[in-house]
């Protein structure tokens, strides 16, 4: 009976080496054994073109400039190739395509239907890599063709969505622990060949890892490139040159690892039911920022200046010299843009009011808290919420955030024109934007050669939910009761801060309650590396800037929102804010049941925020 072996990766587990071995030795695999000849050793492209229903929207393929007609032609060509191979004479046929795991279930059913026309027995095999080294390897592989932030959660494997559909459609999947193989000094190619009684010849590894300094250079280069289209010749040339930079392996930073592992806990549990050893993976990471250049890195990079073809490549792709690109990477040379991003209801108005009022003192330390005139930043402070200009880019956007790079880069260029060591802007609304914007900010900071520093505050859910509810009742037409609001809403402020911290290398996260015991401005002074006395005086002792309303007043206002709408509600809120109540009533608070509910809901996020707070305290220097 004919048999089909379907090797589906996963990515970054030596698939290229398996494919190279089988393709080059395809005439000597043994009687009746066929490694399908689809034009290349890796069958991913053929299966994707033939079966992937959404291929015309996939970034990897759209960057190649294909038209709809091209996609249609490629689909027909590759379907014919696959079916032609299946119709050959053999006892065993082998396909190897790690991109099969990216197909939707409906597409995969079509793959099975085609194979079953010729072969009844299909065995699916997958090599599985532990998540941290997988993410590190995936990061540098993606960097070879495009810019990507190391904090992008898509770097971490999605085991269940990758493999479960194969179990459902093909039946059992053979899972092999790649990590244990490598730890034992064994070869993936040898393991595969031994499993299926294939001849094995030792060969050089394909897609070898780059050194840490090479990955850092690649990150800077991709951030500066003008054209997002992929040029395969340039990619291969760059990889060949960078392979000459020797050094330690690239490691992700502690923040990125912690956030990534936390995000895929359920996935790890699912996979460990199939490979129990996966659950005992040891956390490993770089204690410092993973993309900052050390002195040794810069010495190594100086060797790149000898490569004329690299000089020409950087000039063509980035629009400036290799020397300038290397200068960008000297962190100590960089000016700072500091962003205070909230979260909401953590004293932002108090902080902003004091920064605006003491802007002249800040200038003595080379820090500008800029104002806004004619939709541009100016050196003289004249507004509390000066981050609004940056925030406006997103509020008024008519296209996806991912397409706003030019507009955001213009804002940062404007800030850099202010000619000072440090520029500080603040808007708590930045803290509620989708976390992908921080990846964008970090990329732009690399390109424009400035150090991005971000700080924010988190509040405990027990007190945050009532405060947030009061805000949306007063400003945004909310009409649900606090009880219903707390039970239905899963507020994202804690995970937003966690994502932000993983995206931006220089980040500081503070506990609002802990810092309030001293003064919020002390933590601001620490971030700015100035004496706390510059900001803290007798006047600025955590005073209230925005007055609060009682629970009775808020309940009345939410009913007005429900009956008359948000516009009328906002007018009534303005009146209530300007008036003094005849009698003091209690403020909104959660019951024990609601407190327990939100505490459980955000437990893991709160633990991560507390860890970030501890790390921030350790990383800051206290002056005066």
Image (cartoon, grey):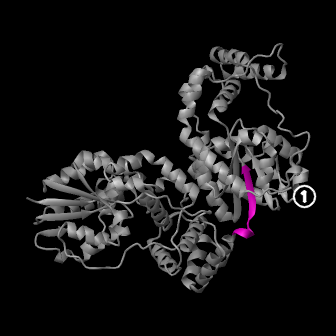
The image quarter containing residue 89 is bottom left
**Relative vertical location of residue 322 with respect to residue 439 in this rendering, above or below:** below
Q: Is residue 580 visible?
A: yes
Locate the N terminus by quadrant.
Answer: bottom left
Instruction: Please state the horizontal and vertical placement of residue 259, each as a whole percent of the image.
Output: 54, 51
User: Does the magenta segment cover residue 42?
Assistant: no
Q: Residue at x 79, y 19 (%)?
A: 576
Instruction: Please state the horizontal and vertical placement of residue 336, each as a whole percent of the image.
Output: 75, 60
Residue at the disc numbered 1: 364
Q: Is residue 36 visible?
A: no
Secondary structure category for the residue under label 1: loop
Q: Residue at x 29, y 71 (%)?
A: 189
Left or right of residue 273: residue 495:
right
As drawn, the residue found furthest toward the left would be 1
Q: Magenta segment, which residues?
A: 331-339
Instruction: Please state the horizontal and vertical placement of residue 28, each as a whole percent of the image.
Output: 17, 77
Q: Residues within 10 Å of mark 1 (few under 14, many from 20)?
A: few
User: Does the magenta segment cover residue 333?
Assistant: yes
The image quarter containing residue 542 is top right
Residue 15 or residue 550, whichever sits in front: 550
Locate the C terminus by quadrant.
Answer: bottom right
**Relative vertical location of residue 315 with respect to residue 432 in this rendering, above or below:** below
Q: Residue at x 36, y 46 (%)?
A: 270
Instruction: Please state the horizontal and vertical placement of residue 251, each as a whole percent of the image.
Output: 53, 65
Residue 594 or residue 102, whichever sits in front: 594
């Amino acid at each position: 009976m004919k048999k089909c072996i379907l090797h589906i990766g996963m990515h970054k587990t030596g698939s290229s080496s398996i494919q190279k071995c089988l393709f080059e030795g395809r005439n000597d695999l043994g009687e009746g054994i066929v490694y399908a000849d689809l034009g290349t050793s890796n069958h991913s492209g053929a299966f994707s073109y033939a079966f992937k229903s959404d291929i015309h929207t996939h970034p990897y393929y759209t960057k190649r400039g294909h038209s709809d007609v091209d996609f249609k032609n490629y689909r027909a060509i590759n379907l014919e190739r696959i079916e032609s191979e299946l119709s050959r004479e053999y006892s065993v046929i082998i396909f190897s395509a790690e991109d099969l795991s990216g197909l939707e279930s409906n597409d995969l059913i079509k793959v099975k239907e085609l194979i079953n026309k010729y072969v009844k027995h299909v065995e699916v095999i997958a090599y599985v890599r532990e998540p941290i080294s997988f993410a590190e390897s995936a990061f540098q592989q993606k960097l070879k063709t495009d810019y990507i932030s190391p904090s992008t959660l898509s770097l971490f494997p999605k085991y269940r969505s990758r493999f479960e559909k194969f179990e459902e459609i093909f039946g059992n999947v053979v899972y092999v622990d790649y990590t244990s193989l490598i730890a034992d000094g064994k070869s993936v190619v040898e393991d595969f060949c031994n499993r299926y009684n294939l001849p094995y010849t030792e060969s050089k590894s394909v897609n070898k890892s780059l050194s840490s300094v090479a990955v850092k250079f690649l990150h800077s280069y991709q951030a500066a490139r003008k054209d997002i289209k992929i040029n395969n010749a340039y990619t291969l040339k760059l990889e060949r040159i960078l392979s000459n930079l020797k050094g330690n392996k690239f490691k992700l930073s502690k923040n990125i690892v912690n956030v990534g592992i936390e995000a895929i806990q359920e996935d790890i549990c699912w996979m460990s039911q199939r490979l129990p050893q996966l659950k005992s993976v040891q956390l490993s990471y770089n204690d410092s920022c993973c993309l900052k250049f050390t002195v040794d890195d810069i010495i190594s990079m100086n060797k790149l200046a000898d490569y004329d073809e690299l000089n020409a490549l950087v000039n063509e792709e980035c629009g400036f010299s290799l020397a300038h690109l290397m200068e960008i990477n000297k962190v100590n040379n960089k000016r700072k843009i500091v962003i205070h991003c909230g979260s909401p209801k953590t004293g932002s108005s108090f902080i902003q009011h004091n920064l605006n009022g003491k802007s002249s003192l800040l200038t003595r330390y080379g820090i500008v808290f800029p104002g806004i005139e004619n939709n541009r930043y100016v050196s003289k402070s004249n507004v509390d919420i000066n981050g609004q200009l940056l925030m406006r880019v997103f509020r008024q956007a008519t296209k996806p955030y991912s397409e706003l790079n030019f507009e955001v880069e213009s804002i940062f260029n404007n800030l850099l024109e202010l000619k000072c060591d440090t520029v500080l802007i603040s808007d708590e609304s930045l803290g509620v934007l989708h976390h992908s914007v921080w990846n964008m900010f970090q990329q732009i900071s690399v390109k424009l050669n400035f150090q991005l520093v971000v700080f924010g505050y988190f509040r405990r859910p027990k007190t945050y939910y009532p405060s947030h509810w009061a805000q949306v009742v007063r400003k945004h037409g909310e009409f649900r009761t606090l009880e219903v609001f707390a039970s239905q809403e899963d507020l994202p402020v804690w995970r937003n801060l966690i994502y932000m911290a993983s995206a931006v290398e220089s980040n500081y996260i503070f506990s609002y309650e802990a810092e309030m015991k001293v003064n919020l401005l002390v933590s601001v002074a620490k971030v700015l590396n100035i004496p706390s006395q510059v900001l803290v005086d007798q006047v600025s002792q955590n005073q209230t800037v925005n007055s609060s309303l009682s629970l009775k007043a808020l309940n009345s206002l939410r009913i007005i929102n429900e009956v008359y709408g948000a516009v009328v509600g906002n007018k009534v809120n303005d009146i209530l804010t300007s008036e003094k109540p005849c009698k003091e009533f209690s403020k909104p608070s959660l019951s024990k049941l609601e407190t327990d509910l939100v505490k459980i809901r955000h437990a893991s996020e709160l633990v991560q925020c507390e860890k970030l707070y501890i790390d921030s305290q350790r990383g800051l220097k206290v002056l005066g």
